[in-house]
Image (cartoon, rainbow, N blue to C red):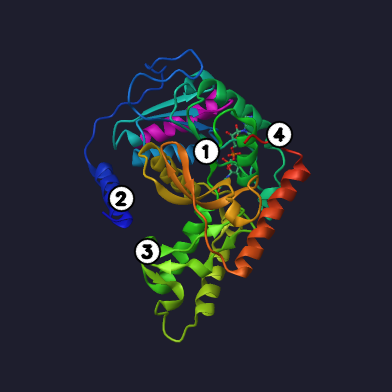
Amino acid sequence: MTDLESADMATSAHVNQLLAPVSVRQDFGSLSTPQGQGGRARSDSRSTVGVIGAGKVGAAVANALALVRSCDRIVLYNRGLARAEGQAWDISDGTALLHEIELLATDDWDDLVGVDVAVVTVGQSIHPGESRLQIDGNDAVIRHVMERLDEVAPGAVVVMVSNPVDVLTRLAIDCSSRPWQRIFGSGTVLDGARLRRSLGSTLGVDPQSVHVPVLGEHGDSSVIAWSVAAIGPVPLEAFPYPQASRLEDVKQRCLTQMRRRGVHDIFTRKGYTDAGIAAVVCRLVEAVLRNERRIFTVSTRALPEYQIGEHVVLGVPSVVGRDGILQRLPLKLDAEEQRLLVRSAATLVGANDQRNSITVPPRE
Ligand SMILES: NC(=O)c1ccc[n+]([C@@H]2O[C@H](COP(=O)([O-])OP(=O)(O)OC[C@H]3O[C@@H](n4cnc5c(N)ncnc54)[C@H](O)[C@@H]3O)[C@@H](O)[C@H]2O)c1
């Protein structure tokens, strides 16, 4: 079965699940699974996802996981219980009509004992017009979150969402005791999805058939690897463009479309982003829980082949599965893309140095 076929099957399974009549069970009390000792594994085989932070993104992630039923249980943690409860109760009003899923709202870290995946969404967001790298208040909270997760869920795969996601993923890797492969950021997966949608609609093909990696920083210095772009099995430059178009026009049209409907325009209109990133996180969580070995451009340590230093954490194509990052993949970039990737890496290194956020030596 091809990757595409299995993706299609997974999608129709989700749709069927959403349409099927189902029983309802919501649990806002304490979990019936074993708790107590930090990191003790649960005795049941149900999958649990912890979402850290019940702000707009955390709530949207919990909602998406619940609607698609990516897991059996969700633990929604917030430092203030009322916020977590409000979000969880609102989500449960919807799932009551769909299917059984356990959802626990909590402000107690011990409730995260044994989670399979922890999604980190706490911290400040950007203000309109600001770059993600200008958010500088999230380092302390991420250190605190990783400390607590190391105590209660040392075996979990951690998916970082908080911005600046590449910088904070590096910080999380450096201050956690778990293997670096078990921590990755959402990286440029959302940027890539935007580009796929835009290029797919320009060329009149399903976005699932569009393969154009977006590498580097999740932010202003990200790099589109046009030179390796392909539509299905056909290299982009060989694909029949719409009449009277040249490849450069197609690229330009996509870039304009992406910019027009990108993060800053969404912010101007609604004040924040949540739905798109929630869908991305949902797919990443599923890739881990189902050991899908699917390729995403998540934030992780660079490969030597990229010639930017392995300490840099940024979006590179990686195989994601049960243990997090199973493999990082090298890409043969053209000279200009390589130059831009070096620039993106330098931007992130500069941001790290400026924030002085790495206070412990990087682990090997
Ligand atoms: N990676 C991506 O593509 C992407 C996309 C959208 C948003 N984000 C990021 O996600 C993060 C959350 O965004 P949001 O819109 O949900 O913000 P929000 O303000 O709605 O929620 C922030 C959450 O963080 C918690 N929090 C803040 N400071 C804290 C602290 N010191 N200790 C404990 N908890 C704390 C709050 O209680 C709240 O639950 C931001 O950093 C944002 O930039 C990332």
Query: Badge 3 is on which residue?
Result: 209
Q: Residue furthest left?
A: 21
Residue lying at 55% horizontally and 28% vertically, measured from the top left: 78
Above-or-below relation of 200 to 174: below
Sequence order check: which comes first, mark 2 or mark 4?
A: 2
Q: Earlier in the sequence, mark 3 or mark 2?
A: 2
Residue 129 quadrant: bottom right
> What is the number of callouts on the image?
4
Query: Which residue of the protein is positioned furthest toward the bottom in this rendering?
Result: 244
Q: CA distance from mark 2 to mark 1?
A: 27 Å
* Mark toward the viewer: 2 or 1: 1
Q: Check residue 361 in the rendering and tell me which mark sits there, or answer none.
A: 4
Q: Nearer the viewer, residue 227 or 161?
A: 227
* Vertical position of residue 265 compared to residue 61: above or below: below
Given contact means CB atoms under 8 Å apart, are the residues at marks 1 and 4 in contact? no
> Which residue sits at x=22%, y=41%?
20
Of labels 4 and 3, earlier in sequence is 3
Image coordinates of residue 68 in percent, x first then y, are: 35, 42
- Secondary structure state at the residue bearing disc 1: helix
Q: From the image, tell me which residue sits under label 1.
A: 181
Instruction: Give the mark nearest the N terminus, 3 or 1.
Output: 1
Q: Residues within 10 Å of mark 3 (few under 14, many from 20)?
A: some
Instruction: Please state which of the two labelled residues, at mark 4 or mark 3, is closer to the viewer.
Output: 4
Give x and y (percent) for residue 337. 60, 66
Residue marked by disc 2: 11
